[in-house]
Image (cartoon, rainbow, N blue to C red):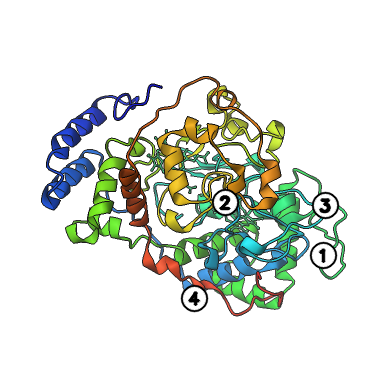
Amino acid sequence: MGTFRKTSFGLAGGLITVGLLLLGASALLAQADSTDTALRQILAAQNITPLTVEADFSPELVALGQALFFDKELSGNRDISCATCHHPLLATGDGLSLSFGTGGNGLGPVRSMGSGRTLVPRNAPDVFNRGAAEWQFMFWDGRIALQTDGSILTPAGAQTPDGLMNIVAAQAIFPITSNDEMRGLSGDRDIYGHLNEIAAIQAGDFPGMWNAVMARVLAIPEYVKLFQAAYPDETTFDIQHLGNAIGAFEIQAFNFTNNPWNRYVAGDDSALSEEAKQGALLFFGDAGCSVCHSGALLSDQQFHNRVVPQLGPGKGIGAPFDYGRMLETGDGEDLFAFRTPSLYNVALTGPWMHNGALMTLEAAVRHELDPETGCATYDPAQLRVTFQPVVMNMDVEQLTLGVPVNRVSLSDAEVGYLVAFLESLTDPAALNLASTIPASVPSGLPLAD
Ligand code: HEC
Ligand code: HEC
């Protein structure tokens, strides 16, 4: 079966050195001191530093962004806000494998889909620590990208407004242009029975949609005040002001890096349990995880095919499949490839993978250790009943195109160590984000429920 540990990570020099260090270290693992010595050598070799997020926006900008993030006024049918799918009480996700957009009812695991609507094709990621400088892409397929010259590539191409402060702000102006997520369908009526004017705008006319959203927001006097307070030097407010405010709120409010792992990396040997240290040794060593989950962000900001079973309606020209990064690059090498997730607070952010195919963190770890077997033995029964019929019946060969994927075989105890390591990436403060929820929003519409 070609099961192996350690060999052929596909990377040269550095990792072999690391592997040798680990081999040398493994004999001594009985002693905590030598665990630390081995781990610190690896961290130095792989240049691992604590993740830091810069977030010092004005309180006025953050207050505006908070109102907008929670306000259903931004959605065509006035029935969904960013918070519906990125809710503070659901670790900034929605707890669902795939999201239910406009037309849906309820919040989190009890949310249901509206009639005549389609599933959103992917899992709603968390929005923790998106202000970290390491991020180069937003979205699972990276369709918002920071270019080397500092400019931002988006699905709107040349229609992208100037003045977006970063890729998080750029991302924030797109959910309102998506029919399934927030915009609605042409002919829709909003919760008051008014024609949905945002959905009536022609597909591809991004400025038209953005202007319609701004017209709505600025028709509410409290928003005009909030925009003026956030941007005291400006007299007109456009979609980039909205995007920058939402981005500032997300970065400021969901900045959670104070976890045992970061304290350990910063030098505190006592910050981490022995199990988590063993897990880290595997993660950065024998198990090969840090080949992709690398650097302070634990993501190489690259795209890889992890043989995750396809599930959902599919996306774009690939539907009913989700081709992932290939949808953006057109490159066959990127077929079924998705951006390597950062793993901070990952214990809180299930279901896991780009389509929420896996329902426990341990299942995600086992899949990542041996993606092909994970795919071949995938059991749709783990999913909420709604999602079971949309699992695509594909074999491993179809997903990998015959290119073998590295596998690592570990004992159950070692799998437990990896889980313990991933749990050490949880900032305890991220367990209760209730204080980020406003009491009300300027439109007077109800908050996500
Ligand atoms: C219907 C649910 C839904 C709504 C509403 C929604 N999102 Fe999302 N969000 C998603 C999904 C699903 C993705 C992943 C889509 C993809 O990668 O193709 C996503 C991706 C993101 C990302 C990218 C994270 C990353 O690292 O890739 C950010 C940031 C984000 N959303 C913020 C927002 C903001 C801000 C709003 C409101 C303006 C919003 N979302 C509205 C479901 C939603
Ligand atoms: C070849 C690159 C690569 C390697 C090696 C790798 N990963 Fe991943 N990992 C990814 C990518 C890419 C995804 C997302 C795949 C998808 O959803 O289709 C992912 C997803 C995950 C997730 C789910 C995160 C989430 O938010 O849904 C976890 C947990 C994870 N990996 C842990 C690990 C562990 C533990 C190892 C080592 C045993 C590992 N990975 C090895 C690239 C890699």
N-terminal of the pair, mark 3 or mark 1, is: 3
Tag 3 secondary structure: loop
> Percent from the top left, x then y, of residue 105?
73, 64
Q: What residue type is labelled 3?
A: Gly
98 or 244: which is nearer to us? 98
User: Any mark on residue 190, and which?
Assistant: 1
- Distance of label 1 from label 2 (alpha carbons): 26 Å
Q: Are marks 3 and 1 in contact (CB under 8 Å)?
A: no
From the viewer's perspective, is the residue at label 3 or at label 1 nearer? 3
Which of the 4 image quadrants contains residue 111? bottom right
What residue sits right under mark 2 in the picture? 170
Residue at coordinates 24% horizontally, 25% vertically from top-left?
13
Q: Residues within 10 Å of mark 4 (few under 14, many from 20)?
A: few
* Above or below, comparing residue 13 to residue 174 in the picture: above
Is 287 in front, or is 189? 287
N-terminal of the two: label 1 or label 2? 2
Label 3: few (<14), some or many (≥20) within 10 Å? few
Tell me the amino acid under the disc marked 4: Ser
The answer to whether the residue labelled 1 contacts the one labelled 4, judged by CB atoms less than 8 Å apart, is no
Residue highlighted by disc 4? 435
